[in-house]
Image (tube, helix red, strand yellow):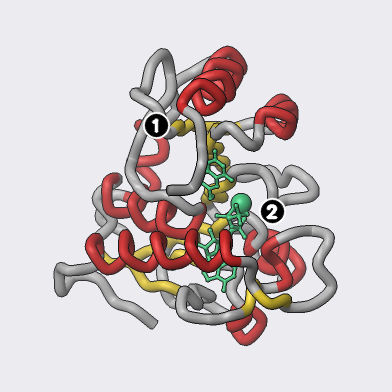
Amino acid sequence: MMGYTELADYSSASLLNSMLHDDLSEDLVDMLKGRTVAVVGAGPSLTSVSHFSEERVIAADGASRYLMEKGITPDVVVTDLDGISEVFPTFYVVHAHGDNFHLLWRVGLMKKVVGTCQVAPFGRLKVFGGFTDGDRAVALALAAGAMKVRLYGMDFDSELTGKYSKPTLQDDIPSSPTKRAKLKIAKWVVEELMQDGLRHKV
Ligand SMILES: Nc1ncnc2c1ncn2[C@@H]1O[C@H](COP(=O)(O)OP(=O)(O)OP(=O)(O)O)[C@@H](O)[C@H]1O
Ligand SMILES: Nc1nc2c(c(=O)[nH]1)N=C(CO)CN2
Ligand SMILES: [Mg+2]
């Protein structure tokens, strides 16, 4: 489907696992369990977001840069490392896959990290579900026992990739076929996860 290889996914997962000193997943659950949670994506609508009424904020990768620019430090950043340009003093949930092996060095700059992978988990690695940073953030919130999840900046049907998706983008850009395929998967995952009435969608 997406042309990924399990061997490459496993190699990145092994490197990430070797960089994790503790399993902080219980701290993550303690932070999110029973809370209302905003999950923030890097879609074009992100730049109209200015505040949250939720108790916790999870940023999907590059969306964290927008929030920091607005003076909002997300409680958690769910990332495969291709959307961030610097490391902030917050909790990172880093995803290892076959195409970000060369970015994993950034984990060494992070204070609080939980590692996820897309192969059978081993060592300190976890799998909470989901595919892209945004829907993995939703899956994490629900797996941790969040009471309600509200989405911001999640424009799965948009033909545009939001400018905060990558540090190099100066503006929203037309999505590539691969990006559109990823967003279609993300939309499906979120719709499956948000079946329950407990979850709100902005
Ligand atoms: N139109 C959109 N453009 C960009 N991100 C979007 C959009 N709509 C929703 N999102 C969510 O915001 C997240 C932003 O993270 P990021 O741009 O790093 O994507 P990603 O999951 O790493 O995919 P890629 O491999 O293309 O970087 C996406 O994972 C996606 O779930
Ligand atoms: N191998 C591989 N796996 C992924 C990729 C990717 O680009 N390559 N992108 C993802 C979206 O965050 C999730 N998983
Ligand atoms: Mg990313």
Evaluate if marks 2 and 1 touch, with contact meaning CB atoms under 8 Å apart: no
Q: Nearer the viewer, residue 73 or 87?
A: 87
Q: Position of residue 73 (x, y in %)?
A: 64, 59
Q: Quarter of the image holding residue 20?
A: top right
**Which mark is drawn over residue 13?**
none
- Earlier sequence position, callout 2 versus callout 1: 1
Instruction: Tell me the residue that label 1 is attached to.
Output: 25
Q: Residue at horizontal 73%, vertical 59%?
A: 166
Question: Is 137 on the left-hand or right-hand side of 93?
Answer: left
Asked if residue 50 shows in the view, the reply is: no
- Residue drawn at x 54%, y 16% as measured from the top left: 14
Coordinates of residue 178 in the picture (x, y in percent): 57, 59
Residue 1 vertical position relative to residue 73 in the rendered view, above or below: above
Would you say the beta carbon of the disc 2 residue lies within 8 angstroms of ligand 1? yes
- Quadrant in which the C terminus is drawn: bottom left
Query: Looking at the rendering, which quadrant does residue 197 occupy?
Result: bottom left
The residue under label 2 is which amino acid type? Gly
Side of 142 where 154 appears, left or right: right
Q: Residue 83 shows which numbered tag?
A: 2
Residue at the extreme left:
196
Q: Quadrant of residue 172?
A: bottom right
Q: Splitting the image into four quadrants, where does ligand 1 fall? A: bottom right
Q: CA distance from mark 2 to mark 1?
A: 22 Å
Q: Where 52 falls versus 63 (above or below)?
A: below
Neighbor class of circle 2 (other Cα within 10 Å; few <14, some 14-19, many 20+) is many
Local crowd size for mark 1, using a 10 Å CA cut-off: few (<14), some (14–19), many (≥20) = some
Outermost residue toward the bottom?
48
Q: Position of residue 108 (x, y in %)?
A: 71, 25
